[in-house]
């Protein structure tokens, strides 16, 4: 699923420049340049001092050779020297991670095949990948929460924490620097520097691959939170691709009594059943939405409608069926970005007080994902259908499998 695919989504590029008068701008720039030069000098001195003090295992990792999967343009993905020149040691508050497991997401494949998603365009070589976990290889100054050798999952988005949305706890709606969303590099690389605050320690028994799976699982957890999924509820999930499946897992973990999953492909529905769906409904492209809705409510044993519908496909037809299948007073959550504009029976939905909500990426989900994985309440291993090593051939083959997405393909994982 492609978390950055929303053309209407809040910009996740760099924050917009604040307009300044030309005099103020000149003064500001001069002051900023002086401050930056002073900081750089101070940092250089501190680094020299520290590298003289440090020896052995504590010595900073110098990334002499550091390979990464770099997307140059459409269909041109190379495993080569990382274009990021990593500093001798991580910045203050940051850690250096030796990446161990990185999953491929639909958006990675989209960038490879199209070179863009909505307003995000690959204009310079970009390291791909945003679903990753690894081992702490160096610790920056001031980091007290992590140490060398710790295994962590990396939350890929680092938001602007002073943005009004972030201050309300909804940092997914703030300007954010997100792995492998231009102009930001991703994490399919041997080493990545990341703020310690966005690296989550893996509990014992949670594998590095499961750590990487926290990223897609987060999308499902956030969607279920938006849908208000609670014990006893009857929930429909539209679409049984990777995001539909993690949403199913999250809904069951949240205590949903019945989760009905619908998809076009029987192979996807088989997987959904294996992953714990209580019922499945195979729909076809030309089927009237009212028919799909009726089949969903029957399958859920909810003649007056299901309590929540989570649309992980995001097409006009799936949203129409979702609104019709939802019980009065229920919620429909739009996660998938299949279509930008659609005609929907809104008046009928409004008269029944069906709430329609958007869901974009996630916020504050990693700790919950890790506890769901540690307790065994969510099992993501079966979603990892293909594994490849980190070589030119491995990366080429992995992306080919992810792109072809033949029956039985869910998640392609690289082991680095
Ligand atoms: Zn993803």
Image: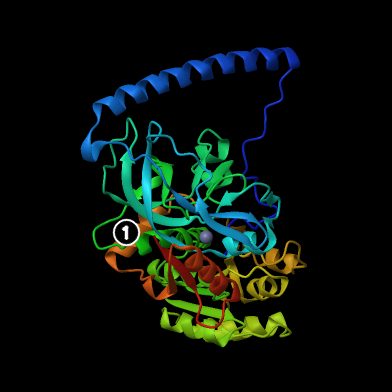
Image-quadrant location for residue 310: bottom right
Q: Give 387 or 157, whichever is nearer the viewer.
A: 387
Count all numbered tags in the image, as a single digit. Answer: 1
Image-quadrant location for residue 292: bottom right
**Residue beneath label 1, please?**
371
Residue occupying image coordinates x 53% and y 85%: 267
Q: Give 221 or 122, whichever is nearer the viewer.
A: 122
What colour scheme does the image use? rainbow
In the rendering, at what x and y percent does residue 168 appear? 51, 40
In the rendering, at what x and y percent does residue 57 appear? 22, 40
In the rendering, at what x and y percent does residue 358 appear? 61, 57
Residue 298 in view here: no
In the rendering, at what x and y percent does residue 55 appear? 23, 33
Residue 72 in view here: yes
Residue occupying image coordinates x 39% and y 60%: 416
Image-quadrant location for residue 139: top left
Q: Is residue 147 left or right of residue 39?
A: left
Residue occupying image coordinates x 70% and y 82%: 285
The local crowd at label 1, few if under 14, some if 14 to 19, many if 20 or more residues have their Cα within 10 Å, is: some
């Amino acid at each position: 699923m492609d978390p950055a695919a929303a053309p209407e989504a809040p910009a996740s590029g760099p924050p917009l420049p604040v307009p300044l008068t030309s005099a103020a701008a000149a003064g500001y720039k001069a002051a900023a340049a002086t401050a930056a030069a002073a900081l750089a000098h101070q940092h250089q001195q501190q680094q020299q001092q520290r590298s003289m003090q440090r020896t052995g295992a504590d010595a900073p990792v110098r990334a002499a050779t550091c390979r990464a999967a770099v997307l140059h343009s459409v269909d041109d993905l190379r495993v080569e020297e990382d274009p990021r020149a990593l500093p001798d040691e991580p910045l203050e508050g940051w850690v250096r991670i030796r990446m161990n497991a990185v999953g491929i997401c639909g958006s990675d494949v989209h960038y490879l095949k199209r070179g863009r998603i909505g307003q995000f365009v690959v204009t310079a070589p970009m390291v791909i990948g945003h679903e990753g976990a690894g081992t702490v290889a160096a610790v920056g100054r001031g980091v007290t929460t992590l140490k060398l050798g710790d295994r962590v999952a990396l939350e890929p988005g680092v938001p602007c924490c002073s943005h009004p949305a972030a201050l309300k706890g909804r940092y997914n709606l703030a300007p954010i620097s997100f792995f492998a969303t231009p102009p930001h590099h991703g994490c399919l690389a041997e080493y990545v520097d990341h703020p310690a605050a966005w690296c989550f320690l893996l509990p014992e028994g949670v594998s590095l691959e499961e750590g990487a799976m926290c990223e897609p699982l987060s999308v499902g957890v956030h969607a279920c939170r938006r849908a208000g999924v609670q014990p006893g509820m009857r929930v429909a999930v539209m679409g049984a691709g990777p995001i539909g499946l993690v949403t199913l897992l999250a809904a069951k973990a949240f205590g949903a009594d019945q989760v009905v999953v619908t998809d076009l492909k029987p192979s996807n529905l088989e997987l959904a059943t294996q992953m714990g769906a209580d019922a499945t409904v195979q729909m076809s492209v030309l089927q009237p939405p009212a028919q799909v809705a009726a089949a969903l409510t029957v399958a859920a044993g909810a003649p007056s409608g299901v309590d929540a519908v989570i649309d992980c496909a995001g097409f006009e037809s799936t949203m129409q069926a979702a609104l019709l299948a939802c019980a009065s007073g229920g919620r429909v959550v739009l996660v998938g970005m299949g279509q930008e504009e659609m005609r929907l029976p809104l008046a009928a939905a409004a008269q029944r007080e069906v709430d329609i909500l958007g869901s974009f990426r996630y916020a504050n989900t990693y700790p919950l994902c890790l506890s769901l994985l540690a307790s065994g309440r969510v099992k993501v291993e079966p979603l990892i259908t293909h594994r490849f090593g980190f070589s030119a051939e491995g990366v080429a083959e992995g992306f080919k499998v992810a792109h072809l997405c033949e029956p039985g393909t869910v998640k392609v994982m690289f082991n680095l």
